[in-house]
Amino acid sequence: MYLVNKLCEKIACCCKRARSEDNEEQSLVNERQTSWFSIYICTIFVLLDGIQYSMVIVSMWPYLKTIDPSATATFFGFIIAAFSLGQAISSPLLGYWSNKAKSIKPPLTLTLSMMMLANIIYGCIELFSTKDRSYIMMATRFIAGFAAGDVAVMRSYSATAAIKEERPKAIVISSAAWNLGMTLGPAVPVIFSPLGYPGWKISENLHLDMYTAPAWLSFINNIISMLVLHTIFKEEYVGVDENMPEDLSTSQQPSLNKLAICLCIATRFSLLFVFTNTETIGSLFVMIMYDWSNEQAVKYYGLITLGQGGVTFLGNLILFLWLSQYIGKRNLERFAVIFGLSMMIFFYFLTFPWPFWDEKLTYSIKQTNGSSTEIYGCYPETYHFCSTTHQVPLWIYVFGMIFVLAISFLISFNPLSIFYSKLLGNTRMGTMTGILFMAGSIARTIGPLIVAPLFSHFGPEITWGMEIVVLIVTIVPWLVFYRQMSPNI
């Protein structure tokens, strides 16, 4: 009897200890908190990446024509596409690397180093011979694009550094940072526009001017970011279920809604396809449409994008503080994406050069710098659509760009990211996020190659028509498969 009592006491003690350990483990899980400090640092990195990418977009075409007068709009499309090609290649590779390393620091160290190199070369392009400058510019954009693949790594980290309930908030702030960076970036050249060209002459072919100053500013930012990465940034994956696979693919988890995942990837492609196209021809469009000079295009189009940035910032602030949680809890992501795509279609109808607009496109030839001449507006010898195209009223174009396009992109883009994260669940998302970003980067690669020659040969009517068709083709599957598009299917 004594032995039986002792045995019972031993079993009871073991059970009590097991329950205590279970309670402690459960308590530890419940006490997990979102690593907001590391998410905020990542968000700043993403914001600066977006600014670096887009700050040279506004001035790139005028700069290219200045340093290589023989450059064509078609070749400029290849230069724009080079960035996105690099990002398309690197996004899934860097995502896979971060998953295997279980750390984002190694890939970020590589990408920051590559961005430094790209900025140095861009700032020194005029040291190369005139015939090589266009190709050197294209090479710098490819290197910068490869480095920008780190955005997918940082986005996936933000999602996995947050607990499930706060993940929509973390995704919104990361998505918002990239969108805000892309809209604020083109306004940066406005700050440097007083430098003019050639600006401060350092040597015969090395200048600090309104075209190269943004690259040197980015270089300084890269150095600061590298220091922050290896000092105060600490990784915490509180949102990862360690019982899940280290990486995720749709073949590994049959319960994933493959239809919804594929449609999300396709939608990101479409969104960035149309946005990049508008961005690619933005400076060219306003120069042709409103008779603006190179300097005016850099300044005024930069101010338009600054207005977009203001609207984007306010919208993202509302999303971060309240709306993202509201959308996430009520599963309204699908509705938001459809509404945003519809609003984007409205933008292209609003800014279409309809025949009922009063003015037609004009041109003028003015003398600059004493001996050289510059063509303002739509020159019929260069663009055959000039005589038949009507001018969109400037106030309508500005209103559409600042409010309609900015809000539509905001409404569709952020909920799409939240929805995609819901579909993937609680696992390391590096590779799958990289695939999502790769789709957008492919769109940014293909878009300029199509839109630059299309706009040059056929003008804004055909170009705007193509954008509308792409958006309609994208929105139809969301309407048809609305009920099937659920994380639980």
Image: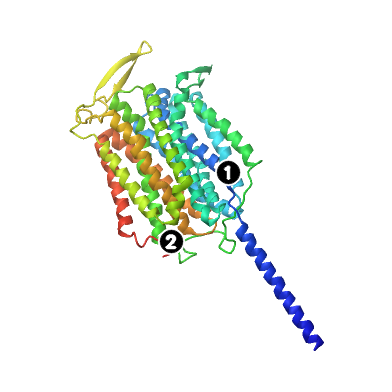
**In the drawing, does residue 374 fall left or right of residue 9?**
left
**In the drawing, does residue 386 fall left or right of residue 367?**
left
Give the number of the mark in front: 1 or 2: 2
The residue at the far top in this view is 370
The residue at the far bottom in this view is 1
Q: Which residue is mark 2?
A: 487
* Crowd tier of the residue under label 2, counting other residues whose Cα lies within 10 Å: few below 14, some 14–19, many 20 or above: some
Q: Estimate the x, y position of residue 218 in percent, counting from the top left.
A: 53, 32
Q: Which mark is residue 108?
A: 1
| Residue drawn at point x = 40 percent, y = 26 percent | 298
Q: Amino acid at mark 1?
A: Leu
Mark 1 secondary-structure assignment: helix
Earlier-in-chain disc, 1 versus 2: 1
Q: Estimate the x, y position of residue 188 in percent, counting from the top left.
A: 47, 28
In the image, residue 83 sits, relative to residue 415, either above or below, namely above
Quadrant of the rendering where the N terminus is positioned:
bottom right
Q: Can residue 448 be seen by looking at this rendering?
A: no
In the image, residue 235 sits, relative to residue 29, either above or below, namely above
Considering depth in this image, is 160 or 56 the residue closer to the camera? 160
| Residue drawn at point x = 30 percent, y = 47 percent | 342
Q: Amino acid at mark 2?
A: Pro
Q: Residues under labels 1 and 2: Cα distance?
A: 31 Å
| Residue drawn at point x = 30 percent, y = 43 percent | 467
Q: Estimate the x, y position of residue 93 in percent, counting from the top left.
A: 52, 50
Q: Estimate the x, y position of residue 376 in percent, counting from the top left.
A: 30, 21
Quadrant of the rendering where the C terminus is positioned:
bottom left
| Residue drawn at point x = 38 percent, y = 39 percent | 406
In the image, residue 116 sits, relative to residue 98, either above or below, namely above
Considering depth in this image, is 26 or 129 the residue closer to the camera? 26
